[in-house]
Image (tube, helix red, strand yellow):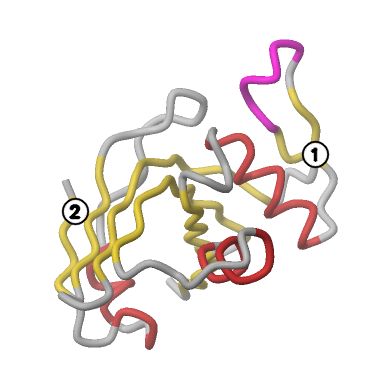
């Protein structure tokens, strides 16, 4: 399955915070599918507090229509060709070349771990990284 990485870390630190990107970053992520393509969307905790905020940002950037539920706990994509698979948390250490994916999303459930290690291992952004999935 083709995997596309979207990482809001550089955007947040460079453009919004006006700071250097730290070597260790923690945050949340969601998996979103369209057809046979999987999007792994990472966002530092300082940029998006909830998984729904990550989905909202992704939709805004891609021009995809969506909306929040009444309690604003879940952002739903209106186009049924897009599917939110699940989410979790991540920790990445650029110097040690380690990324850890773990936990789950209260709004979207546990991310799909099957085959994820192999999918990430072929991405140039994670070349040489140790990938840990819990």
Which residue is located at x 27 percent, y 86 percent? Answer: 127
Residue for badge 2: 133
Measured from the top left, where is residue 129 in percent x and y?
20, 78
Q: Which circle's residue, 1 or 2, is located before the other in the chain?
A: 1
Is residue 72 one of those drawn in magenta? Answer: yes
Residue for badge 1: 66
Q: Which mark is residue 53?
A: none
Secondary structure character of the magenta stretch overall = loop
- Secondary structure, mark 1, is strand
Quadrant where the N terminus is found in the figure: bottom left
Q: Is residue 97 or residue 83 the one in the foreground?
A: 97
The CA distance from mark 1 to mark 2 is: 29 Å
Which residue is located at x 44 percent, y 23 percent? Answer: 106
Up the image or down, 130 lies above or below 48; here it is below
- Secondary structure, mark 2, is strand
Quadrant where the C terminus is found in the figure: top left
Q: Which residues are magenta?
A: 70-75
Query: Which quadrant would residue 77 be assigned to in this image?
Result: top right
Up the image or down, 106 lies above or below 113; here it is above
């Amino acid at each position: 399955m083709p995997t596309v990485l979207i990482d809001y870390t550089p955007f947040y630190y460079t453009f919004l915070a006006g700071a250097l990107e730290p070597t260790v970053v923690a945050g949340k992520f969601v998996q979103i599918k369209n057809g046979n393509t999987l999007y792994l969307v990472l966002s530092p905790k300082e940029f998006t507090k909830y998984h729904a905020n990550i989905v909202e940002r992704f939709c805004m950037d891609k021009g995809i229509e969506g909306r929040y539920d009444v309690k604003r706990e879940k952002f739903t994509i209106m186009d049924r060709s897009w599917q939110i698979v699940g989410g979790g948390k991540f920790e990445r250490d650029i110097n040690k070349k380690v990324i850890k994916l773990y936990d789950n999303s209260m709004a979207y459930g546990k991310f799909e771990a099957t085959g994820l290690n192999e999918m990430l291992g072929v991405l140039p952004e994670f070349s040489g990284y140790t990938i840990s999935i819990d």
